[in-house]
C-alpha cells in the first residue's frame, strides 16, 4: 500500500514538474542527445529520495537542484572517458514484426520512423541551438519570447531559427516522401 502511494505521489510530481525540469536541462546541455539520459537520472534519484520517506518542501526546486548537479557531473565524467560505440553489432530481432499482421501497417510504421529519423538528423545538423528551440517550442509549447529569455537570444533570432528551419524541413520532407 505504501509503495502505491509513493508511486502515485511520484507520478503527480512528475506531471507537475517535467516541463520545467526538461526546459532547465535542455537549456543547460551542450549536446541535446544527452537530455533524455539526464532527465532519467534526475527522476530516478528523486524517486529514490521519495521512497526513503524524506520530506521535501519544494519538489520543483529540489528537482532543479538535482538536474543542475547531474548536468555538471555528466559533462565532467564525459570529458574523462573515451567515446565507445555500443551499437557496433546489429541484431535481427523480428519478434515485433512477427506480431504485426498487416504489411501496410509495417510500411506506415517504417516510413514514419524513417521520416522522424531524417527530421531529427536534419535538426541536429543545424546545431544545438536549433534543436533546443524546436524542442522547447514543440515539446513544451513555450512561447518564442520565453525561449529567447531562456537561451539568451533575441526574439527575432529565435523566430528566424524557427521559421527558416520549418521552411527547410517542409521542403526536405517533400523530397523524402
Image (tube, rainbow, N blue to C red):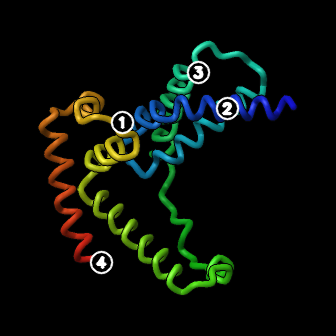
Q: Quadrant of residue 25?
A: top left
Circle 3 SS class: helix
Give the foreground label among 1 and 4. Answer: 4
| Quarter occupied by the N terminus | top right
Q: Of marks 2 and 3, which one's residue comes earlier in the chain?
A: 2
* Residue at 74% from the left image edge and 35% from the top image edge: 7
Query: Are dots 1 and 2 in contact, CB under 8 Å?
Result: no
Q: Left or right: where does residue 175 sit relative to residue 62?
A: left
Residue beneath label 2, please? Answer: 10
Q: Of marks 1 and 4, which one's residue comes earlier in the chain?
A: 1
Q: Position of residue 177 (x, y in %)?
A: 30, 78
Give the foreground label among 4 and 3. Answer: 4
Residue 35, placed above or below residue 87: above
The numbered dot on residue 59 is: 3
Residue 142, placed above or below residue 78: above
The numbered dot on residue 159 is: none
Residue beneath label 4, please? Answer: 177
Alpha carbon distance from label 1 to label 2 = 24 Å
Alpha carbon distance from label 3 to label 1 = 20 Å
Residue at the farthest right position:
1
Q: Position of residue 114 (x, y in %)?
A: 40, 73
Amino acid at each position: 500500500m505504501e509503495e502505491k502511494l509513493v508511486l502515485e505521489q511520484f507520478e503527480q510530481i512528475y506531471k507537475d514538474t517535467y516541463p520545467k525540469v526538461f526546459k532547465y536541462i535542455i537549456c543547460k546541455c551542450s549536446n541535446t542527445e544527452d537530455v533524455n539520459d539526464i532527465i532519467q537520472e534526475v527522476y530516478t534519484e528523486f524517486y529514490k529520495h521519495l521512497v526513503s520517506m524524506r520530506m521535501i518542501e519544494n519538489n520543483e526546486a529540489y528537482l532543479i537542484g538535482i538536474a543542475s548537479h547531474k548536468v555538471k557531473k555528466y559533462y565532467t565524467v564525459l570529458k574523462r572517458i573515451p567515446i565507445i560505440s555500443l551499437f557496433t553489432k546489429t541484431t535481427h530481432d523480428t519478434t515485433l514484426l512477427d506480431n504485426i499482421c498487416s504489411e501496410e501497417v509495417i510500411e506506415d510504421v517504417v516510413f514514419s520512423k524513417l521520416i522522424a529519423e531524417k527530421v531529427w538528423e536534419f535538426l541536429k545538423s543545424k546545431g544545438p541551438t536549433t534543436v533546443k528551440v524546436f524542442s522547447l517550442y514543440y515539446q513544451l509549447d513555450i512561447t518564442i519570447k520565453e525561449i529567447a529569455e531562456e537561451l539568451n537570444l533575441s526574439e527575432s533570432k529565435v523566430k528566424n531559427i524557427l521559421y527558416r528551419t520549418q521552411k527547410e524541413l517542409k521542403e526536405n520532407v517533400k523530397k523524402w516522401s
